[in-house]
Amino acid sequence: MRSAGKEPKRKNKGKANRSDKHGHNKSRGGRHGHLRSIKRVHGHHSENRHSGANAIEFLKNEARLLEEKLISVQQRIKDMEEGKIPSELKAIINPELCIGCGKCERACKHGAISIDEVAVVDKELCVGCGHCIEKCREGAISM
């Protein structure tokens, strides 16, 4: 039992007690504040910067892969337009919209379109390049 006039003994004489009831140092950000100081001391923050550098390298690599894919797709488009690679898509004429003007026939480099009152597409010759769609002002051609 304590005497009425005596103060309890303190470990840190003259200093405020900075620990909670579990002995965790409150002055460093609460219960887990000591972990933050340990991370700084052991260089964990530099690892975070390192992982940031890894993220940048990852993104640069992704950009290179996308650029390579873009070049490949552009080459495929060029080959399709030149008829080197036939497309699964073929021009389709809407006879209700077609006025038989012949612009699509002149635009087709492969001779796949002829005019017989309205445009007619030869599916064997059509490579799906889409030049006819670009020239049709009536919107009568789709793929």
Image (tube, rainbow, N blue to C red):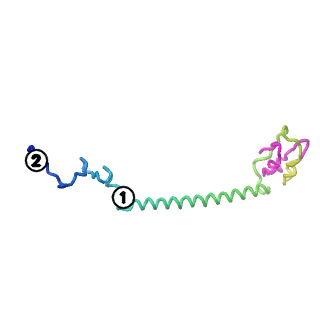
Q: Amino acid at mark 1?
A: Lys
Q: Quadrant of residue 99?
A: top right
Q: For residue 39, which numbered disc appears in the image?
A: 1
Residue at the farthest right position:
117
Label 2 packing within 10 angstroms: few (<14), some (14-19), many (20+) = few
Crowd class of label 1 (few under 14; some 14 to 19; many from 20; radius 10 Å):
few
Quadrant the C terminus occupies? top right
Secondary structure type for disc 2: loop
**Residue 115 image position (x, y, % from top left):** 90, 45
Span highlighted in magenta in the image: 114-143
In the image, taking residue 8 as reference, residue 95 lies left or right, namely: right
Percent x, y of residue 63: 60, 59
Instruction: Provide the residue designation for mark 2.
Output: 6
Instruction: Residue at 29% x, 53% y: name it.
Output: 27
In this picture, residue 110 sits left or right of residue 57: right
The residue closer to the viewer here, 5 or 44, is: 5
